[in-house]
Amino acid sequence: MLAKALSYGVNGVDGYPVYAEVFISGGLPSLDIVGLPDTAVKESRDRVRAAIMNTGFAMPISRVTVNLSPADIKKEGPSYDLPIAVAVLVANNQVIPESPEDTVLFGELSLDGTLQPVKGALPMVISARQEGMKSVILPKQNAREVITVQGISVYPAETLREVIYHLTGREKLPRQQQKSYQECLDNTVFPVDMADVRGQVGAKRAVEVACAGGHNLIMIGVPGAGKTMLARCIPTILPPMTYQEALETTRIHSITGALRGQGMLTLRPFRSPHHSASVPSLVGGGSKAGPGEVSLAHNGVLFLDELAEFTKQALEALRQPLEDGVASVTRVSAKMNYPSRCMLVASMNPCPCGYHGSKTKKCRCSSHDIRRYLDRISGPLLDRVDIQIEVDSVPVEEIRHTGTAESSADILKRVQAARERQLQRFAKEGIHSNAQMDAKQVKRYCVLDTGAEPLLTMAVRSNHISMRGYTRILKVARTITDLRGGDVIGSNDIAEAIQYRSLDQKYWSS
């Protein structure tokens, strides 16, 4: 007696088909699982046995062999419980399904037969649809996660009994009504707004430029000046994610189990790891080579508060993912590439006490303490930050000011207009923003007028700016030009872009 049920596994951020093949033969009662199962898969023997019996069916009083094919890929997690249970019942002639060959099954089983959510539902459903599968049965808690996937019928289920009744035609599960991405996008609500930030006009302008071009940003200033609040407002002035971006981002969150019943992500991710974060937690790793914070921030913002408190090893590990937009995670048992194209936003104090250069409070740090503190940020990492700004404390008059500040919606209009210019410019280039330009594209699209060239040359020589820094000044200037709707980079655009590279001279040159 042989039967099989179709399921899906996850490899990186992609799904792949897995067949749960069950063969019942003579011999002492047992249930053996082969096909490179991990511990969670091996333990499904007891979950499946209890779930079948508590659902009102009987386990075969024979030897049961379960093969998870393909057998050369390691199977991880409890998502194969449901297809194994169904295949056992079919092989034992207790269940005769109507058309199981084009139905995908996955879900963890409780001992009473209740279905529990699993990680990676979205990449599995997307891959199943791409390979022509007609329907998928999954735990009800995973249903919202896949609500925007079109072209495949989704049937949320709560128990093993409901799945069996559906497959046999006895009682069909209600089909989930899928939504368009625009419907989900229309319900987006931001918890913060730029209008809530008092003062900091110069800092807001720098943040706007960074968002308009997708540039990395660092803010240096005294404690309580509003650096963290400014950073948390950045997603509110970034253009809404496209459907493709939302799929990419949600897939990464899905495989980590971070969604926890959420639907498709419509807000750009804002990841703010603690400064005690390790290298694997930032760039990815662990025994299963999972994604890190830089990949969870894909298409969004990676905010590193108290930058100088991170370990130097962790910060240096971010250099490659930030430059390439891909985090390569290699372990003995796995090698994965996770997308990591995000905005790096960092904030830090100018010294250990936080008040070096403050106009309101005296610094109590020695010059040696300040130098040692700042040296935690390496030159190569600082070179990858396009915009550097200083954020000072806000005068009490501005804090008490009751006038209406510019809202995120107003700033977003300018940012979107600049991004539209970039999308048209790079329509055939395979990139989306000025920050993604390579050397050839910088040469082609960053054309300076006659007044801007000598100004840039003088700044590079006097400030000892590196080749990477020179290129990044041009990228930022291109964004400033886009914000004003111009075609050729002018001297004012270059002057503003140079201004955003001045803090390394102030804090790190001596």
Image (cartoon, rainbow, N blue to C red):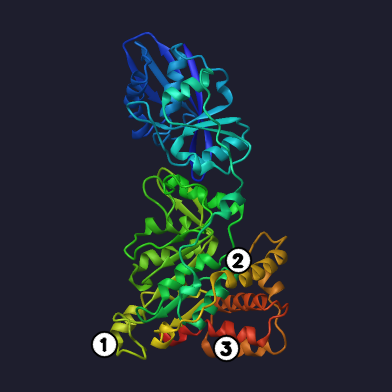
Q: Mark 1: which secondary structure? A: loop
**Viewer-closest of 56 and 130:** 56
Please say if 187 is above or below 198: above
Please say if 357 is above or below 27: below
Which residue is labeled 3 in the image? 459
Circle 3: residue type: Ala
Q: Mark 3: which secondary structure? A: helix
**Residue sitting at 70 percent across and 82 percent down?**
448
Placement of the C terminus among the 4 image quadrants: bottom left
The quadrant holding residue 278 is bottom left
**Dot placed on the residue nearer the N-terminal end, 3 or 1:** 1
Which residue is labeled 1 in the image? 364
Residue lying furthest front: 402
Which residue is labeled 2 in the image? 436
**Dot placed on the residue nearer the N-terminal end, 3 or 2:** 2
Q: Mark 2: which secondary structure? A: helix
Left or right: residue 197 compared with residue 472 = left
User: Label 3, label 2: how many angstroms apart (C-alpha)?
Assistant: 23 Å
Circle 2: residue type: Gln
Circle 1: residue type: Arg
Q: Residues within 10 Å of mark 2 (few under 14, many from 20)?
A: some
Left or right: residue 67 compared with residue 62 = right
**Residue sitting at 68 percent across and 69 percent down?**
441
In front of the other: label 3 or label 1?
A: 1
Q: Residues within 10 Å of mark 1 (few under 14, many from 20)?
A: some
Q: Position of residue 240 (x, y in %)?
A: 58, 60
User: Mark number for residue 182?
Assistant: none
**Residue sitting at 50 percent across and 52 percent down?**
338
**Residue sitting at 61 percent across and 74 percent down?**
475
In front of the other: label 3 or label 2?
A: 2
